[in-house]
Image (cartoon, grey):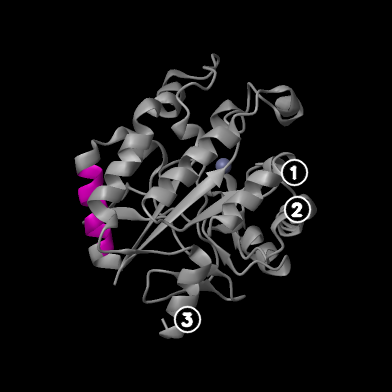
Amino acid sequence: MSTMLMTVDVEEWFQVENLRPVFPPHTWDGCESRVEGSTYLLLDLFDEYHVVATFFVLGWVAERHPGLVREIHERGHEVASHGYGHMLSGELNRSMLKEDLYRSKAILEDIHGEPVQGYRAPNFSINAELVDLLVESGYVYDSSYNSFAAHGRYGRLEGTWTPLQSGFMIAGNGLIEIPISNLTLGRSVIPWGGGGYFRLYPSHLFNLGVRSIIKSRGYYLFYCHPWEFDPDQPRVKGMGLGRRFRHYNNLAKTSARLSGLLDAVGKGHRFATCKKYIGIQDAINI
Ligand SMILES: [Zn+2]
């Protein structure tokens, strides 16, 4: 049976890279927090469809909303790390990056009492140093590689990786990579994993693409953010037109679209957390 891996990057509406020039980190504590409402909306929707998902929670958010982390865990989902301060990997030196990885892991583990095994880099900014440090910091898997590298801020996979049958890869140091799902047409890679693309494409087309990915790969990994389900978030001026469109496009429809995806594609597939799915793959020797 094929598997849907639903993932959520839990961060505030003002922490996304597009808004960094307007909201540098020292302003965050003065911004209106909206992450709880939109994360609860997702949790309720997942309950309705019996979805178990993986939540990559930002350490900064977890510190301020420990109850939300416990709720995610108590509803049967996996708590994983999105780092602490949402800085792109390439912007931090080695010791700062290591500190960010350790700090977020420790905060999340203290709150819900389970080992945190998974990590997703802000803006999929994976690089060789990150792969090293993740293993040093005790992570088992990463889910930051997006093969749609045309997007300038996405990272590239450096070093030696062994592809596994499942579409996963394993690094020389043992780190497992669960890539974001994309659609391959001939030699082209079309972004199909979620986020802004999920809000942009017509739902019917998106759902067809997901079916096709599941058929060829045996699994599909979807990602989204709570702020994408919050049409009432403050609108911010001062970003370019393209970014503005990508950021605010179709926010009022995201929730209905996700229900539509789960209705159209969810049935007949099992849902798994990333941690559990790696275990299943291990058991059948990948
Ligand atoms: Zn993020």
What is the distance, in whole Å, between disc 1 and disc 2 at their CAs? 7 Å
- Within-10-Å neighbours for mark 3: few <14, some 14–19, many 20+: few
Give the residue pinned by disc 2.
Answer: 107
Please tell me which residue lies in front, 226 or 159. Answer: 226
Q: Where 278 falls versus 206 (above or below)? A: below
| Ligand 1 picture quarter | top right
On the picture, is 85 further left or further right than 164?
Answer: right
**Dot 2 alpha-carbon crowd within 10 angstroms: few under 14, some 14 to 19, many 20 or more:** many
| Residue 208 among magenta residues | yes
Q: Residue at x 72, y 52 (%)?
A: 104
Q: Where does label 1 land, which residue? A: 63
Q: What residue is pinned by disc 3?
A: 282
Where is residue 81? Give x, y as percent: 63, 54
The residues colored magenta run 205-214
The kind of secondary structure element at disc 1 is helix
Residues at marks 3 and 1, CA–CA distance in whole angstroms: 33 Å
- Is 55 positioned to the left or the right of 212 in the image? right
Q: Amino acid at mark 3?
A: Asp
Residue 258, given in percent of the width and then of the height, sits at 34, 42
